[in-house]
Image (tube, rainbow, N blue to C red):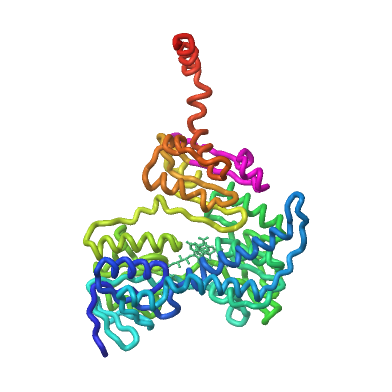
Amino acid sequence: MQLIETDICVIGAGSGGLSVAAGAVQMGARVVLIEAGEMGGDCLNAGCVPSKALIAAAKAAEAQRHGFRGVAAQEPQVDFAAVKDHVAAVIAQIAPVDSQERFEGLGCTVIRAFARFTGPAEVEAGGQRIRARRFVIATGSRPFVPPIPGVETTPYLTNETIFDLRERPGHLVVIGGGPIGVEMAQAHRRLGCEVTVIEGAKVLGREDPELAAVVIDALRAEGIRLVEGQPVVRLSGSDGAVEVVLGDGTSVTGTHILMAVGRKVALDGMNLEAAGVAHTGKGVTVDARLRSSNRRVYAVGDAAGGLQFTHVAGWHAGIVIRQAVLGLPAKADPRAVPRVTYTVPELAQVGLTEAEARKLHGDRLTVIRADLHHNDRAIAEGKDTGFAKVMVVKGRPVGASIVGPQAGELIGLWALALSARLKMSAVAGMIAPYPTLGEVSKRAAGAYFSPQLFANPWLKRFVRLVQRIIP
Ligand SMILES: Cc1cc2nc3c(=O)[nH]c(=O)nc-3n(C[C@H](O)[C@H](O)[C@H](O)COP(=O)(O)OP(=O)(O)OC[C@H]3O[C@@H](n4cnc5c(N)ncnc54)[C@H](O)[C@@H]3O)c2cc1C
Ligand SMILES: NC(=O)c1ccc[n+]([C@@H]2O[C@H](COP(=O)([O-])OP(=O)(O)OC[C@H]3O[C@@H](n4cnc5c(N)ncnc54)[C@H](O)[C@@H]3O)[C@@H](O)[C@H]2O)c1
C-alpha cells in the first residue's frame, strides 16, 4: 500500500471539502482530497443546483400560465424531459469548477475512493494510506429514510433520484414539508403535476409562522394540497400507484412518493472510533473551532452536525483554513447565518426570528416592519405580497425576516448588518436606488426612527423654535 504524507487531508469533495482544499492548496499547503462519489457533492449533483434549475423552469411555466395585465395567459406546454435536460446542462456548466482536473491543476492530490480512518493520524482510501498533520471530515449527509412500515417494499424518490425522472409524475406525494419538500412541491406543481404534501407537524415549521403562512397560502392557491399534523403510518404500492396511510386512518394515493423528511449525516463506515473522533447521530461532535475530540481532525458542513447549507459549509471552510493552514485562532458564531427557502414567494431569515428575539430580549426588543404593498417596484411588477420584519435591540438589528419576491437577495444586506454589527442608522442612511425591492430594507430601518422623528412633541417644539430663529 502506497503511503502519502501531507499537511491536510480533506475527506469529501462537496461544498465544504472543496472550499477547504482550494483555499489550503493555493496558500501553499500540501493537500490530499478524497471523494467517494461525484466531485461537487450534494449541492452540485443532487441539491441546490438541480433544485434551483428546476425551480427556474417551473417559474417560466407559471409566468406563461398567468400572463400579465394586457398579456394573454396560456397553458404552458411543458416537455418534462427537456426540463431535465436543462437541469443537467446547468450542472454540467458549473461542474468544471468542482472537477478533479481543476483541483489537480491547483496542486491537490485527488483520490476517488471511500476514505476510512485506520488510526488517529491516518486514513486509507483506494489502496493508499494517507498520513496527514490535519484531517477535515466534509462527508455531508444523505436523505433520511424513516422506518415507516412498508418503506422497504414501496418505491420512493429522494433528492438523489428525483432529478433523474424523465417522465412527469402524475401525482407526486411529498412526505415532509421542510425546505426540500416545499421547493420540490411547488416546482412540480408548476410543471403540471398534481402534488400533495404530507407534513407530520407544521409546514416550514422552523420559520416565523407569520412568514410561513404567506408561503403556505401561495402553495395552496397554486393547487398544492397540504396535509399538516399527520404522521405517515404506512406505505404501499408499486411503480406508478402508491398509497400513503396517515395517522388518522385516511390515505392519499398517487403515482410517486418523494421522501423529504430530513438528512442523515454520512459517517457510516468511516471507522471514526479508530481516530478517536466522537460523534452522535447528528454528526461529528465539534467545538466552536470545529475541532473534534481528536485535535488533528476538524469537521465542516453537514458532517459538523449543525446548520445544513452550502454557504455554511463554505464559511466553515474559512474557519478551518485560518487554524489549520495559517495557525490563527477562529471560531464559528452562527448568529449571522442567513437561510432562504426558494419558493415563490421566497422566505429568508437571518439572526433571530421574532419569537426567538422576544424570548431572549423581552421588553428591550422592538419589531419593525415594512410591507411590499408600499414598495413601488413590487407594485409595478405585480408582486407586492410580502413584508420585511426587523428585530432591533438597542439600535442594532438582531434578526431580519423577509417574505416576498427576491427575499433571498434582500436578506444579504441584513446578513451584513448583523455580521458587521451595524446600527439601524447605517441602513437608514443608505441611499437605495429607486425603484427597487431593496428599498423595503431602508423603509424598515426608517420606520425604526419614525416615532422618534415624527411623533416627538419635544422635537416639534424644537423645530418651531429653529424656524423662528434661522434667517
Ligand atoms: C434538494 C436539496 C436542495 C438544497 N438546496 C440548498 C440551497 O438552495 N442552498 C443551500 O445553501 N443549501 C442547500 N442544500 C443543502 C446543501 O446541499 C448542503 O448543505 C451542502 O451540500 C453540504 O455540503 P457538504 O460539503 O457538507 O457535503 P456534500 O456537498 O454532501 O459533500 C460531501 C461529499 O463527501 C463524499 N463522501 C462522503 N463520505 C465519504 C468518504 N468516507 N470518503 C470519501 N468521500 C466521502 C460524498 O460523496 C460527497 O460528495 C440543499 C440540499 C438538498 C438535498
Ligand atoms: N433553500 C435551501 O437552502 C435548502 C433547500 C433544501 C434543503 N436545504 C437543507 O436541507 C435540509 C434538509 O431538508 P428537509 O426539508 O429534508 O428537512 P427538514 O428537517 O428541514 O424538514 C423535514 C420535515 O419533514 C417533517 N417530517 C419528519 N418526519 C416525517 C414523517 N414521518 N411524516 C411526515 N413529515 C415528517 C418534519 O416535521 C419537517 O417539517 C434542510 O434543513 C436545509 O438545511 C436547504
Q: Residue 210, can we see it?
A: yes
Q: Tell me which residue sits at (78%, 56%) in the image.
A: 72
Q: Quadrant of the C terminus?
A: top left
Seen from this angle, which residue lies furthest bottom? 1
Left or right: 402 as drawn, with respect to 8:
right
Assess whether residue 325 is covered by the magenta stretch.
no
Left or right: 348 as drawn, with respect to 228:
left
Q: Is residue 35 above or below residue 211?
A: below
From which residue to which does the magenta span run?
362-390
Q: Which residue is more in the foreground, 151 or 391? A: 391
Task: Give the x, y percent position of residue 199.
Answer: 61, 62
Q: Is residue 462 above or below residue 337?
A: above
Task: Give the x, y percent position of residue 201.
Answer: 58, 59
Q: Tell me which residue sits at (54%, 49%) in the image.
A: 208
Task: Give the x, y percent position of residue 337.
Answer: 42, 53
Q: Which residue is more in the foreground, 59 or 233? A: 59
